[in-house]
Image (cartoon, rainbow, N blue to C red):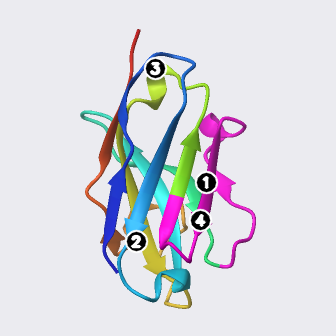
Amino acid sequence: VQLQASGGGLVQPGASLRLSCAASGRTFSSYNVAWFRQAPGKERIFVAYNRRSGGSPSYADSVKGRFATSRNNADNTVYLQMNNLKFEDSGVYYCAAKRAFTPVRYTYTDAREYDTWGQGTLVTVSS
């Protein structure tokens, strides 16, 4: 599967954005998908996790209650709705995928767990 993230932009604090992660391939429904954020000079950190089964998503504590991830397997797309954006939410957002039922090497919050990455989309929160 190949991934392409989009939807980033420049917004003011308190605004909303919706990111999309479009996947190619007919087996997208077999993949768990995560969102990560990378600020300049910083490591890539976990933001949200969307299970292939459609179970409850998981979020980093810093975005709980503000961000929501969802997926539409029919359209091969995973979304990240970001509300009440803060300065510290700025960075390049990446979606990453790992096929379900393959050996787990790290936790789902660890970027090393994922084999497939999109190219990233930049989110800048600035006044």
Residue lying furthest front? 75
Provide residue 93's location: percent of width, then percent of height: 38, 46
The relative height of residue 123 versus residue 98 in the rendered view (above or below) is: above
Which quadrant does the N terminus fall into? Answer: bottom left
Q: Residue at x 66, y 35 (%)?
A: 66
The relative height of residue 60 versus residue 105 in the rendered view (above or below) is: above
Crowd around label 4: few <14 · some 14–19 · many ≥20 (10 Å) = many
Q: Are marks 1 and 3 in contact (CB under 8 Å)?
A: no
Q: Amino acid at mark 3?
A: Phe
Q: Are marks 4 and 1 in contact (CB under 8 Å)?
A: yes
Q: CA distance from mark 1 to mark 2?
A: 17 Å
Q: Residue at x 55, y 30 (%)?
A: 16
Q: Secondary structure at mark 3?
A: helix
**Which residue is tagged 3?**
87
Provide residue 83's location: percent of width, then percent of height: 61, 32
Q: Are marks 2 and 3 in contact (CB under 8 Å)?
A: no
Q: Amino acid at mark 1?
A: Thr
- From the viewer's perspective, is the residue at label 1 or at label 3 nearer? 1
- From the viewer's perspective, is the residue at label 2 or at label 3 nearer? 3
**Which residue is tagged 2?**
114
Q: Amino acid at mark 2?
A: Tyr
**Residue 85 appears in which quarter of the rendering?**
top right
Inspect the magenta stretch and tell me whether residue 63 lies in it: yes
